[in-house]
Image (cartoon, rainbow, N blue to C red):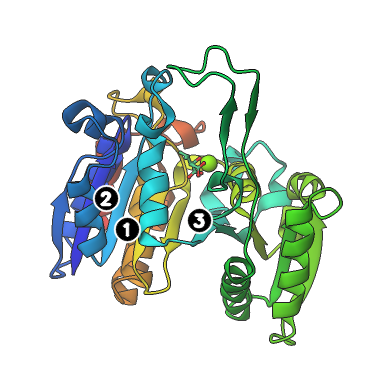
Amino acid sequence: MKIAVLPGDGIGTEIVAEAVKVLNVLGLPLEMETALVGGAAYEAHGHPLPDSTLKLAKEADAVLFGAVGDWKYDKLDRPLRPEQAILGLRKNLGLFANFRPAICYEQLVGASSLKPELIAGLDILIIRELTGDIYFGQPRGRRIAADGHFPGAEEAFDTMRYSKPEIERIAHVAFQAARKRSKRVTSVDKANVLETFQFWKDVVTEVHAQYPDVELQHMYVDNAAMQLVKAPKAFDVIVTGNMFGDILSDEASMLTGSIGMLPSASLNSKGQGLYEPSHGSAPDIAGKGIANPLATILSAAMMLRFSLNQEASAVRIEAAVQKVLAQGLRTGDIYSEGTTRVSTREMGDAVVKVL
Ligand code: IPM
Ligand code: MG
C-alpha cells in the first residue's frame, strides 16, 4: 500500500509526523514516501505543486496531507501561492467528494462554545463538492491592468459554474452515504438568488428519485448557517457545493469543540483519496509543538478505511484516540480545567502507546 506523505507548511510537518508514527505501529505493509508541497515546495522548487510531488500523489493509493499556506506568501501571484497546491491536487486527482464529519466526542462537550445539550452526541457529515463551483470557474481574473499584482485593476470576477454530471455524482455520493446513516440528506443551496444553485437543487431532486428510502430536504445556505448553531443535531448528511461547503464545514467544526479534532477525506471515482485535517497550517503556532495532531491521526484512520481497505486498523486508531481523551490528555485547543495539557508529540506518543 503506497502512501504519499505531504506534510506541507506551518503545523503540517508537526502533525503529520505524529500520524506517520501511528501508522508505523500498526504492523501493516505500508510504503510511505514524503514530498514537499505548498510554501515549502515553492521555497525549494519555485512551485507549490512540483511535477514530482504530483506524480508521487497520482501513483499512490492514498495521500496523507498536512496543511499549506502562510501569510508571507500573500503577495505572490495566485498560481504560485501555497493554496494552489491543494487545489491542484484535488483537480488533478479528480477528488470531487469531500467528507467532513463533525463528531462531538463525549469528553470534549465542554470545549465547545455552544451549550452542552445542543452538541452532546452530535454526529453530522458534511459532503462538500470539491472540484467545481466558483473555485474552478472560468473565466476569472481582473480587468484593465495585468502587470504584476494588478495595481491598476478596477474590477475582478470569478465564475460560479456547475455541470449536470458534477452535481449528479456528488448527489449519488450523499444519498449513498445517508443510506448507511439515518437516511436524511439536507441539500444546501442559494436557489433564491443564484442560477447555479437553482440548477443544483433541480438536479439533486432528480437524482433523489432513485433513492425513495432517503429523505431529502433543501435549505438555503444562510438558513443552514443559522440552523447549524441553533439546532445542529437536526442535521445528518449535508451535501453542498464547494464554497458553501468550505464555510459550513468550518462552522460545523467548532460545534465539536475544536477544529483540531476533525479529519477529512477527499475521494475520486477510483477510490483514491487525499486525507487531511479539516484545519489549516496555523502559522501563528507553527514550530511551538502545541498543535493538536488528532485530526491528522483520525484522517489516517479514514485513509485506512476508505482507500486501503483496512477497516480493523481504522477502528483501532479511533478507539485509541477515544482512550487518550478518556485519560484526560489534551492539547491546548481542547484543554479545560482538570485535564492534562500535553504537546503535539506527547499526544502522538500517547496514541502510539495505547495501540
Ligand atoms: C479547506 C481550505 C482550502 C479551501 C484552502 C486552503 C484552499 O480552506 O480545505 O477548507 O478553501 O478549500
Ligand atoms: Mg476551508
The answer to whether the residue labelled 3 contacts the one labelled 1, judged by CB atoms less than 8 Å apart, is: no
Quarter in which the N terminus is drawn = bottom left
| Residues at marks 2 and 1, CA–CA distance in whole angstroms | 7 Å
The residue mark sitting in front, 3 or 1, is 3
Left or right: where 76 falls relative to 173: left
| Relative image position of residue 292 (x, y in whole percent) | 38, 38
| Residues at marks 3 and 2, CA–CA distance in whole angstroms | 26 Å
| Relative image position of residue 31 (x, y in whole percent) | 13, 62
Residue 229, above or below 202: above
Q: Residue at x 43, y 59 (%)?
A: 265
The answer to whether the residue labelled 2 contacts the one labelled 1, judged by CB atoms less than 8 Å apart, is: yes
Q: Residue at x 25, y 56 (%)?
A: 57
Per the image, label 3 sits on a secondary structure element best described as loop
Q: Residue at x 78, y 54 (%)?
A: 195
| Relative image position of residue 303 (x, y in whole percent) | 34, 64
Say what amino acid the circle numbered 1 marks.
Answer: Ala
- Other-residue count near label 3 (Cα within 10 Å), few / some / many at <14 / 14–19 / ≥20: many
Task: State whether residue 81 appears in this view.
Answer: yes
Residue 329, above or below 180: above
| Residues at marks 3 and 1, CA–CA distance in whole angstroms | 22 Å
Question: Mark 1 highlights which residue?
Answer: 300
The picture quadrant where one finds residue 293 is: top left
Residue 131 is marked as 3
The residue mark sitting in front, 3 or 2, is 3
Between discs 3 and 2, the one toward the N terminus: 2
Question: Mark 2 highlights which residue?
Answer: 19
Say what amino acid the circle numbered 2 marks.
Answer: Ala
**117 or 248: which is nearer to us?**
248
Per the image, label 1 sits on a secondary structure element best described as helix
Per the image, label 2 sits on a secondary structure element best described as helix
Task: State whether residue 327 appears in this view.
Answer: no
Residue 272 is marked as none
